[in-house]
Image (cartoon, rainbow, N blue to C red):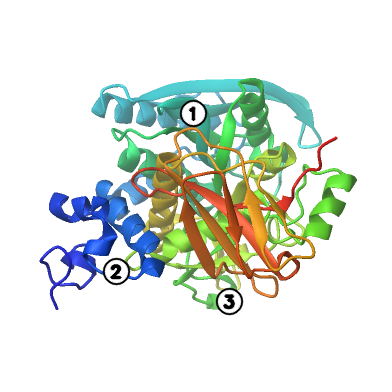
Amino acid sequence: MTGFCGQTTAPLCGYNLYNLPAHCRRFAALPLRLVGIPGTLVVMLISLLLAAAAPALPAPSQPRLRATVTALVGFGTRHTLSTTTDPKRGIGAARDWTASRFRALSAGCGGCITVERISRRFTGPRAPQGVLVEDVLGIQKGRDPTRVIIVGAHVDSRVTGEMDATSHAPGANDNASGVALVLEAARLLSGRQFDATIVYAVFSGEEQGLWGATLLADTARARGWTVSAMLNNDIVGNSVGQGGVRVADRVRVFSEGIRASEDIAQQQRRRAEGGEDDGPSRALAKTVDGVARTLPDGLDVMLDRRPDRFGRGGDHEPFLKLGYPAVRFSVAAENWDRQHQDLRTEGGTDYGDTIAGMDFVYLARVTAINVATIARLAAAPAAPSDVGIAGALSRDTTVTWSAVPGAARYRVRWRRNDTTDWTGSRDVTGTQTVLTQTPVDDHFVGVSALAADGSESVVSFAGRVARPR
C-alpha cells in the first residue's frame, strides 16, 4: 500500500516518527481537504508528522553502564560518613570521579554541561556529629535556563549497620545502578539543544535521611527554578528478586496521588473535583508509561499508585514536599538479600550488593525509558496552568487555561470519570474550547502544551474555574 508521501505505509510513510523525509513533513502544511482525510484524523496525523523533526536517540550502552558500576564499586565504600580525603576509597573519591565524568562529557560537547558541587551540613540520628553532604550536578542549559528537568540518583552506599562507614559496601544496585543511568543519560543527551535545562544530579546522604535530595530541592526553590519533572532512579539494575523470582519485563514507577505539598483545603478541593489520580506526579508517571510504550523492546511500566514502596522512601520525596512533580523508578522484584547487607555467605546464600546480582540488559532498558522521557519533556513547553472547566447543568463542558510560552498548540484530553486513561483528545491553538455533549459531571479533562515538533508536556488536570472575587 502506498502512502501519502509515496512510501509504503508500514508504518506511516514507511519511516519511524524520528526519520520522516522532508517532503513527508511538508505534507502537514497542506490543506487537508485536498487529500480527503477525515476531520477526526487531522490532528493525529499532523502531530505524528511534526514529531519527525527530532533525530533518533541512540541506545544506552550496556558496557558503559557496567563500567560505571564497576568504577563506583571500586571505591570500597561510599557511605556518607566515609573518608573524603582518600583519593581511592570512600564517598569523597566517588564524588570526585563522578564530577570528572561530567567534565569529560562536557569536553566532548563543547562545554554543554556545567559541573557544580553544592553542599550543606546536616545532623541527624544517622550522623549525630554532623556531616557535610555534597551533590554533584551536571547542568545542560536549555533555551530556558529556569525551567528544568531533573534526573537523579544517590551515590552513597551502606551495609547492615547504618553507621558502619568503613566496611566494604559495594552498593552495586543500590545505587551505582542509578548513578550509571544518570551518567549514561547525560552522554546520550549532551550536545543536543533543548528548550528546558536538564539537571543530572548525583546525591549523597540518601541513606542518612534523603539529605542530598533535600539540598537540591531547596536549591531549586532558592534559584527560582520551575521543575517540570524530577525522575529519581534508585535500585534499577536487577531482574532477579528475592527467592530467585525473575521479572525482566517490567519496571515500577511510583507516584503520589494526593499531593504532599497541598494543605487540607487544597486536598479537599482535589477530592471534590476527583483529581486524586491526576496530580502532577501521577500525570508524570502516566507520561513515562506512554513514552515507554513507544520504545522498541521497551519495558512495561507498572504505575505504582504510592509515593514509594510500602513504608519506605526515596530521593524524590523532598521534591514532592515542595510541590514539584517527581517519581521513583525501581526494579519490579527487589532482592533484599542484596540490599543493606554485610558481605557474607550463610546457608548457601550470598549476601551483599555486588555486581553479580545485576542485569545490565535490564538496566539499559530502564535507562532508555528515562532518556526518552527527558528528551520529550525537555523539548516540550511547560505544562499549562490555571486549567479549569465549567458546565454545570449543561451537556457541554467549557475548558480554559493560561497561555504557555513557546506552545504551538494545546491538546485537550478527556475521559469518563469511571476510567483512568484518556480516551478522547482535541488539538487547539487558543486557550479555550467547548466539548459538546461531554457533561462535566461525568468526565475528567486535562490539557497539555505542544511544541511545533509535537513534543508534549505533562497533562494538567482541569479543576473548577476560579470564581471572580
Q: How far apart are labels 1 and 2 at the CA level?
A: 48 Å
Label 3 sits on residue: 243
The amino acid type of the residue labelled 1 equals: Leu
Secondary structure category for the residue under label 2: loop
Label 2 sits on residue: 37
Q: Residue at x 45, y 39 (%)?
A: 407
- 1 or 2: mark nearer the eye: 2
Asked whether residue 129 appears in the rendered view, the answer is: yes
Secondary structure category for the residue under label 1: strand
- 3 or 2: mark nearer the eye: 2
The amino acid type of the residue labelled 3 equals: Gly
Label for residue 451? none
The amino acid type of the residue labelled 2 equals: Ile
x then y, percent, for residue 411: 50, 54
Residue 242 figure quarter:
bottom right
Q: Is residue 255 left or right of residue 448?
A: right
Q: Residues within 10 Å of mark 2 (few under 14, many from 20)?
A: few
- 3 or 1: mark nearer the eye: 1
Asked whether residue 356 appears in the rendered view, the answer is: no
Q: Is residue 62 above or below residue 248?
A: above
Asked if marks 1 and 2 touch (Cβ < 8 Å), the reply is no
Label for residue 137? 1
Q: Report the quarter where the C terminus lies.
A: top right
